[in-house]
Amino acid sequence: MQISNKDISQPNFRSKAFLVNHVRSILSFYHPQCIDASGGYFQHFNVDGKVSNSNSQKHLVSSSRLTINFAVAAKQFSDPDFLEAARHGVAFLRNGHRNVETGGYAWILEDGLVRDGDNHCYGVAFVLMAYARTYGAGATEIYDYIEETFQFMERHFWREEDQLYVDVMDVDLKTVSPYRGQNANMHCCEALISAYEATGEKRYLERAIIIAKRITVELAAQCDGKIWEHYNDHWLVDFVYNAGDTENKLRPWGYQPGHFTEWAKLLLLINKHSPHDWLGVRAKALFDKALEVSFDRDYGGLYYGFSPSGEICSNGKYSWVQAETIVAAALLATQQENHAYWCIYHQFWQYAWTYMIDHEQKCWHRNLTHDNKTIAPSLVAMGRTDYHSICSCIEIINLLSE
């Protein structure tokens, strides 16, 4: 594997001091300049780190993820400025995105008005996580928002007969899309783990376990243990949905190895709270399969997607994929006491440090070509917030502190 012809020194990637400094460095790109005094956060930045003039739109996912970033940093560093920034984000979720008539959350706002009012379970999952993380960081006044959001999801998205959440409902919460996807459920699982960690209420963890087993064991059995992204309304795999669209931001065609490693992380986080043998077994199997099929032995990193036949169908390198692989490797190394995963951890950190991170502007590039050339017109646009890199580092800091 070619790692570098760049002159970039390599830090100690298992050092808590390095991880703390890296999180603070990333946050310096966003804070305080991302704070929009009129509400929420600016979500578009130029390559020079300045707020872009194109900031009329605000996406629910970015509004939530930036809130999460500040909340986890506030808790980790006991920083009142970050907690205030998280509270600022919560206020905008309530006063900007939330539909006071239905309790739903608008997907996209533009110039303060609703551009897309549909209710996406994927987005509401991040709202739940934003509330949980901010509450856990010290904003105890928002406890009721966690319960409210969980109950909203229970009434409108949860299907008891499927033991999973549906994906999209219209603005009036009357029409349900026939599309079913694992991605929204994966982030619901993540949000529920966060809600459990913040409140200690076991019902959240119990629901997370149900979702995890449904996706990574029962539905994965349709694909020889691999996780397909798309399903019909009977939760049967749909290999035709978005066929050919391998770069779709939310619903790409093909197996997503980054979701394999992200699921490995979630399974191991659940295992920390409620140990069961199957959690570690499936985490290892998914992680190993992702690297077996999608690791680039020439240029490093994990490819974005592979086909049902095992061929790489999307050879770009996405930052979130590498970040999730790093934290999953650390959890596997620790829980399974297997040093080989620390070697993988170092290998992926070395790759990210050399290519993925803009060392001048501090944040991570969204994606690269297969041979590690930057292709994004700007470092940060709507939907990209360094959420994966920040939260992965925080999780590893906590792991090293145990």
Image (spheres, rainbow, N blue to C red):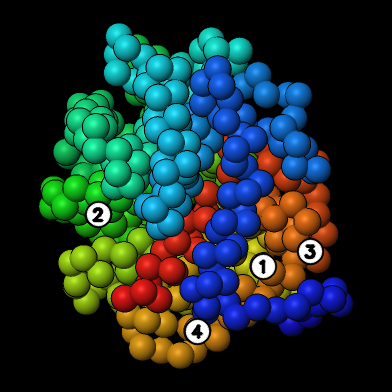
Q: Quadrant of the N terminus?
A: bottom right
| First reached walking from the N terminus: tag 4 or tag 1 | 4
Seen at 73% across and 24% down, the residue is: 54
Which residue lies under the disc numbered 3? 372
Q: On the picture, is 122 further left or further right than 296?
A: left
Q: On the picture, is 280 further left or further right than 147?
A: right
User: Pointers 2 and 3 in contact (CB under 8 A)?
Assistant: no
Q: Identify the amino acid type marked 2.
A: Glu
Q: Identify the amino acid type marked 4.
A: Trp
Q: Quadrant of residue 371?
A: bottom right
Q: Secondary structure at mark 2?
A: helix
Q: Is residue 364 something that shows in the picture? A: yes
Q: Is residue 114 or residue 33 the one in the foreground?
A: 33
Residue 273 percent coordinates (x, y): 21, 65
Q: Is residue 112 or residue 150 the one in the foreground?
A: 112
| First reached walking from the N terminus: tag 2 or tag 4 | 2
Which residue lies under the disc numbered 1? 352
Q: How many marks?
A: 4
| First reached walking from the N terminus: tag 1 or tag 2 | 2
- Label 2, label 4: how far apart the Cα atoms are: 26 Å
User: Pointers 4 and 1 in contact (CB under 8 A)?
Assistant: no
User: Pointers 1 and 2 in contact (CB under 8 A)?
Assistant: no
Seen at 51% across and 21% down, the residue is: 39
Residue 146 percent coordinates (x, y): 24, 35
Considering only vertical position in the picture, is 315 above or below 108? Answer: below
Residue 197 percent coordinates (x, y): 25, 54
| Mark carried by residue 342 | 4
| Mark carried by residue 197 | 2
